[in-house]
Amino acid sequence: MIKSMMKSAVLALLVSTSALAETEVLLLGTGTPVPDPDRSGPSTAVIVDGEAYIFDAGGGMVQRAIEAAEKYQLDALYPTNIKHVFITHLHSDHILDASELAATYWWRRDEKLSLYGPVGTEKFINGYYDMVSVDIRLRTSGKQPVKNPTFYQVNVKEYVEDTVAYENDKVKIEAFRVPHGDIRPAFAYRVTTEDKVVVISGDTAYSERMVDIAKGADVLVHEVISEQGLSKLPEFWQNYHSTSHTLTSELADIASKAKPKKLVLSHILHYSAPIDSVLGEVQANYPGEVILGNDLDRF
Ligand SMILES: [Zn+2]
Ligand SMILES: [Zn+2]
């Protein structure tokens, strides 16, 4: 009797431990189009039960994923293990390493990479096929071992409106349209798992919608622009940014209403102002937890 009780207690512990494989958020790139040696192009990984879901693939993110895989012993982030990449919009700073990821060691992949994103994603991938056509022709000529000669290819799912981009029994990934200047559509993503809600804003101007999208998130990874930095830019860029990006005071307003447990600043446009100006500016109007994100930060 006691033995069987102990056995079921151990089993319950095992089940609860496996159910507790906590969702993690890892920043693979916190940069912007402005060159910065410490920040790769935008990319955020959400790790759910040993699987990585990547949001944006800015230049340098593949290298960061390799670093993260080693640093945190996270096999899910080894390039050939990454299966799902979600694109917020087609600005080059958000997509260029999707081709790098698709090409990296593809001949050792166990399955194709899948790319989910706005209409136009397929065209981008067709461009990637053209770009690497010499390499593909040689590697698929039968002279070198490849696991599957089609695994350089990428599955693409495109959308133009709000949608459930992906869903399985462990994760639901919803795409929501957000305003980002002239580039349409642009999406934010809301990731719901058993234990967490993670929201990634992508690039977006201020919108009341973001309050609904981010409501109750455990982690809100949000883009931001420094008001101090913006004020010193030429008029064209001031106008451009105010219809394309979220000012620190606007982000404080969003966070005050959406009440995320953690607000993580990424894709930080600060120009001539020091980068931590954004932190001070948000904190001046928002009392919750705010973190200035750096590449390889883990939450
Ligand atoms: Zn951007
Ligand atoms: Zn953009």
Image: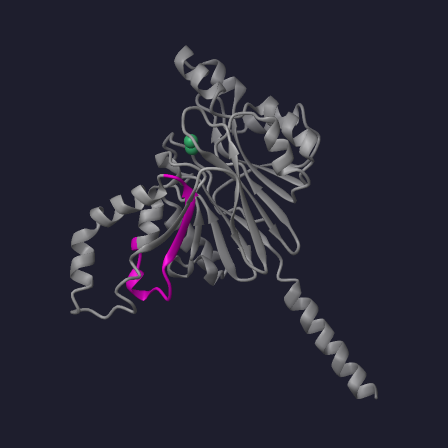
Q: Is residue 155 left or right of residue 68?
A: left
In the image, the segment drawn in magenta is 103-119
Camera sees residue 283: yes
Location of residue 51 in the rendering, given as x and y in whole percent from the top left corner: 50, 59
Total numbered labels placed on residues in the image: 0
Q: On the rendered image, what quadrant is the N terminus found in?
A: bottom right
Q: Is residue 110 magenta?
A: yes
In depth, the one of 188 and 287 nearer the eye is: 188
Vertical arrangement, residue 166 with respect to residue 244, above or below:
below
Q: Is residue 142 magenta?
A: no
For image coordinates 17% across by 58% down, the residue present is 137
The image quadrant of residue 87 is top left
Location of residue 105 in the rendering, given as x and y in whole percent from the top left corner: 30, 60
For image coordinates 16% across by 65% down, the residue present is 141
For image coordinates 20% across by 63% down, the residue present is 140
The image quadrant of residue 220 is top right
In depth, the one of 210 and 29 nearer the eye is: 210
Q: Is residue 6 left or right of residue 173?
A: right
